[in-house]
Image (cartoon, rainbow, N blue to C red):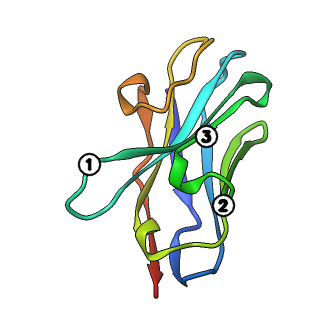
Amino acid sequence: QVQLVESGGGSVQAGGSLRLSCATSGYTYSYYCMGWFRQAPGKEREGVATIRTFGDTTYEVSVKGRFTISRDKITLYLQMNSLKPEDTAVYYCAAKAGHSLICPLSETAFDYWGQGTQVTVSS
């Protein structure tokens, strides 16, 4: 059974930094695909970044150059720098089932989800 548990959210002023973590268990695919998504109040959930085997990454345009996704053996990370008020949202960790050769920035491609962690950026 795959479990994803996020942590590291909180409140920060604009320009600040946060690092989100997603502890994984039961996710052991050699060719993996994992990602971070976010949902702001009144908006649909959107992709933020994905990472797949060999470290290939994809970023949503508004976070490129500010956010960095990475992974070690059991934890997925999202380093967020130069935060803006529009980054305020609930952030979700996600993983795609099966061995993955592609890793799209689309929530419909992902099978496992964490419970989410709140990030609030004040101006």
Ranked by sequence position, the earlier of labels 2 and 3 is 3
Looking at the rendered structure, the kind of residue marked 2 is Arg
Q: Residue 66 bears which disc, if any?
A: 2
Q: Is residue 97 above or below residue 122?
A: above
Q: Nearer the viewer, mark 2 or mark 1?
A: 2
Looking at the rendered structure, the kind of residue marked 1 is Glu
Q: Residue 26 bears which disc, if any?
A: none
Residue 26 visible somewhere in the drawing: no
> Which residue occupies the foreground of this view, 72 or 60?
60
- Residue 99, image quadrant: top right
Instruction: Identify the residue shown where x is 77% and y is 31%.
Output: 55
Instruction: Identify the residue shown where x is 41% and y is 69%.
Output: 86
Ranked by sequence position, the earlier of labels 1 and 3 is 3
Q: Marks 1 and 3: CB-CB under 8 Å?
A: no
Q: Which residue is mark 3?
A: 24
* Label 1 to label 3: alpha-carbon separation: 25 Å
Looking at the rendered structure, the kind of residue marked 3 is Thr
Residue lying farthest left? 42
Q: How many numbered marks appear?
A: 3
Mark 1 residue crowding within 10 angstroms, few (<14) / some (14–19) / many (20+): few
- Residue 16, image quadrant: bottom right
* Label 2 to label 3: alpha-carbon separation: 24 Å
Mark 2 residue crowding within 10 angstroms, few (<14) / some (14–19) / many (20+): few
Locate residue 88, reporting x and y percent.
Answer: 41, 69
Q: Is residue 58 above or below residue 70?
A: above
> Tag 1, which secondary structure?
loop
Q: Which residue is mark 1?
A: 44
Q: Nearer the viewer, mark 2 or mark 3?
A: 2
Q: Nearer the viewer, mark 1 or mark 3?
A: 1
Locate residue 33, reporting x and y percent.
Answer: 60, 26
> Tag 3, which secondary structure?
strand
